[in-house]
Image (spheres, rainbow, N blue to C red):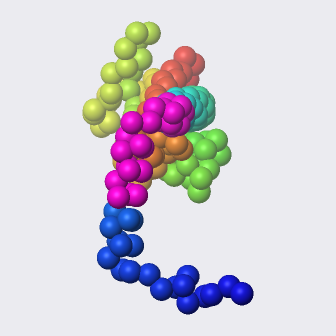
Amino acid sequence: MFNFRSVFSFDANKASSKKQYYLVDKLEDFSEDEGGIATVWAIFWLILCFSISGLAIAVTNAWKVHAILQSTADSAALAGAYELSVYENIDIEKEVEIQANNYAALNMSPVRYGDVLIDPDIRFGYWDGTTFEVMTDTSEGTDLANAVQTITRQAGANGSSAVGTFFLRFIGFDSFNVVTSATAKIFIR
């Protein structure tokens, strides 16, 4: 018959010293063993692959948002230029801003993307074929503006939201700032 008393009776001093020697022996064996280097290399390469994948996904997403923002800036500038060509009075800035904002909201929903086009980013001026000059004086007697420039952005400023990243958040890179602009000139009044 098996004696349970002998199993559970032991000397506490002998047990603790045996455990200490056993632990020291295992730590020495572990420090000298080179068999687990593949795990370290696998973890290193896994982190590197996740970082590169995260960068590829985030840059692709930012590029996609850039294309949508450019399309939005183009359509808003064209809508504003159309309003310039229809109306010939000096006080049409508000109408142009309304139409440009309407087209921007149709292209990029403010619910999803934030406010990508704000009124200060809709500028009136003169386009001479190479440069855009902002119109500063809108009083009576000045030349009418012949161009509209719009700047769309997802930059975390002006009430819009920056383009977020995915895997790159783990290394502290949370967002991209994307800004585009477009200028449309009217030729016939």
Instruction: Say whether residue 181 is magenta.
Output: no
Question: Does residue 75 lie above or below 128 as drawn?
Answer: below
Q: Give the overall secondary structure of the magenta segment.
A: helix
The number of discs equals: 0
Question: Does residue 145 lie above or below 159 as drawn?
Answer: above
Query: Foreground residue, 78 or 59?
Result: 59
The quarter holding residue 121 reads top left
Q: Residue extending furthest front?
A: 1
Q: Which residue lies at the image location 32% right of the left edge and 29% below the top edge?
A: 135
Q: Residue extending furthest bottom?
A: 5
Question: Does residue 139 lie above or below 10 as drawn?
Answer: above
For this view, does 54 lie left or right of residue 32?
Answer: right
> Is residue 126 visible from the viewing direction of this image?
yes
* Quarter of the figure with the C terminus: top right
Where does the image place residue 148, in percent across and percent down from the top left? 46, 29
Where does the image place residue 130, in percent across and percent down from the top left? 40, 9
Instruction: Say whether residue 34 is magenta.
Output: yes
Q: Which residue lies at the image location 38% right of the left edge and 80% below the top edge?
A: 11
The quarter holding residue 162 reads top left
Where does the image place residue 22, in percent across and percent down from the top left? 40, 58
Question: Does residue 13 lie above or below 76 as drawn?
Answer: below
Tell me where the magenta segment starts and ends, as one range: 21-44
> Is residue 163 visible from the viewing direction of this image?
no
Where does the image place residue 109, in percent across and percent down from the top left? 62, 50
Q: Which residue lies at the image location 41% right of the left edge and 17% below the top edge?
A: 127
For this view, does 4 lie left or right of residue 93?
Answer: right
Query: Foreground residue, 5 or 173?
Result: 5
